[in-house]
Amino acid sequence: MAFKQCRKLVVLVLCFTLCDCDSQSNNGNSGFASVQIRPKPIWNATHTDKLKQDLLLSYDKFARPTQHYNTTTVTIGMTILHVEINEFKSTISVNAWIRLVWTDEKLKWNSSDYGGLTDVNFADHEIWQPDIMLYNSATGSSVNHLGGTHCVVKENGEIIWVPPTLLVALCDFNLRYWPFDTQTCSLKFGSWTYDGSEIDIKNFDPSTDLSMIVQNGEWDIAQPETFRSVTHYTCCDAPYVDVTFKLTLVRRSPAYRAIIVAPAFVVIMLALMGFWLPPQAGEKVLLNGCTAIIISIFMVYFTQKIPTMGSHTPLIVLFYSSSLYIVCFSMLVSIIVIWISRTQHHRPLPWIIKRYLTGLLGKLLGLSHYIAETSLSSQRMTAEEMRDHQVTEFEDHQTNDDHQFMGSSDKIPIQQDWVLLAAAVDRIAFVFYGLLFAILAAVYSL
Ligand SMILES: *[C@@H]1O[C@H](CO)[C@@H](O)[C@H](O)[C@H]1NC(C)=O
Ligand SMILES: *[C@@H]1O[C@H](CO)[C@@H](O)[C@H](O)[C@H]1NC(C)=O
Ligand SMILES: *[C@@H]1O[C@H](CO)[C@@H](O)[C@H](O)[C@H]1NC(C)=O
């Protein structure tokens, strides 16, 4: 132990004597380490070297470069290059250049003392930089999202720092009007540790520059608004200042118009067209089935495109899902109509219904063709009946074939009446569904 201390002492004494000699020989050049280890460079120091050495001599880069009672004013601006939105993660990514300007009281000089040098570049973190951060950053722990680029310091102490960054911010999307929606996202910048009396943040006017923007295929960006606000947090008395950039993005929808709105129109048309097929036609069921499949495919597409956990269900999705219900009930109506028109009825149509259908209601529903057919067949029947009666009166014995013919001809007018009813149900359903779709379209387009 004692031996070790003794050796330390010897080393120290040796060192001091060495330094002493050196400083004497070097003519008052203080700072023993630099002289001892580094020989004089063969090149002559430039004005920039001298200036940097002079400015950074005992400069503390972690100390705010002004008196504690003075405020450092930081001016912030942004040049937006590209904007991207992730609906599933509820984030907005902005490629931007942040422009920060402040004044450092310690970094001032007279250019005439340094050969007319008016500005000098400093590396990132070589001098004090304000801890301006994106408050609503979505990239959690990676605090250092302002990249490591150099700063330019001017003669009067003004510092310009333009770090290019990728800002990922949280944003609450409202997808109710998807795909014709407009989203508003905020980028809130503020000092993390300094309060309003220490660092005051202002914004440039205009604070955002969109001239360099690389357009996103899906989103149009409007000129952002910028405002400064002062917040009091529960932790501390001092106010905290922040500057918020409010980005308004409008979804460009021509592609969506083609992909989503046109099929919606076709679905409505298909559903309505089914009611105009002849009442006996089994194709109705096929048509409705196809429509249901089309709608289901679109629902799957929507789940791929839209976050299903969102609080606002897009109206277009509600439209498609209510259309699916409508198509299902329209299938039911079709089956009833087919059943009415195809089964062999033994009872005639209740006369009250028949009277309405052959009257004004039938004309209103455009059933004149069916009415004409029923009246024609009933006329034919009465004519046949009369002839048959005459025949039976005169000739008692009839052939079996004739009996059968008479039997089937007896059925035709009854069947025609039921077909008339089926057609009427179809038409009423058509009018009803037409109105329903009109209401749906009106509700969802508002
Ligand atoms: C450095 O400066 C001295 C005089 O100040 C001059 O004689 C010398 O040539 C310079 N050296 C270089 C490399 O410029
Ligand atoms: C710092 O504050 C003092 C007192 O408020 C003021 O006189 C002085 O001009 C301020 N200095 C700067 C650089 O703002
Ligand atoms: C810079 O120095 C020159 C001469 O030393 C002097 O004339 C001039 O006023 C100074 N400028 C400032 C801004 O101090």
Image (cartoon, rainbow, N blue to C red):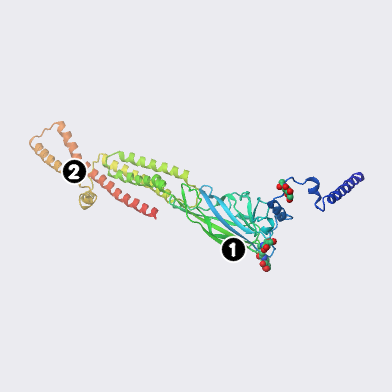
Q: Is residue 376 above or below residue 435?
A: above
Crowding near the residue tagged with mark 2, few <14, some 14–19, many ≥20 C-alpha atoms within 10 Å:
some
Q: Which mark is residue 230?
A: 1
Question: Where residue 401 sits: x, y (%)?
Answer: 16, 31
Q: Amino acid at mark 1?
A: Val
Q: Which mark is residue 373?
A: 2
The residue most toward the right is 2
What element does badge 1 sit on? Answer: strand
Labels 1 and 2: the sequence-earlier one: 1
Horizontal side of residue 98 vs 65, given as left or right = left
Which residue is at 12% across, 38% downward? 388
For the question of whether residue 338 can be seen, the reply is: yes
- Quarter of the image for the C terminus: give it: bottom left
For the N terminus, the quadrant is: top right
Residue drawn 13% across and 39% down?
A: 384
Q: Nearer the viewer, residue 321 or 54?
A: 54
| Amino acid type shown at disc 2 | Glu
Q: CA distance from mark 1 to mark 2?
A: 83 Å
The residue at the point 39 percent across, 53 percent down is 444
Q: Position of residue 344 (x, y in %)?
A: 25, 39
- Residue 60 seen in render: no
Q: Position of residue 192 (x, y in %)?
A: 64, 56
SS class, disc 2: helix
Comparing marks 1 and 2, which lies closer to the viewer?
1
Please state the horizontal and vertical placement of residue 232, each as a whole percent of the image: 61, 63
Q: Which residue occupies the foreground of this view, 421 or 410?
A: 421
* Closer-to-camera residue (435/2): 2
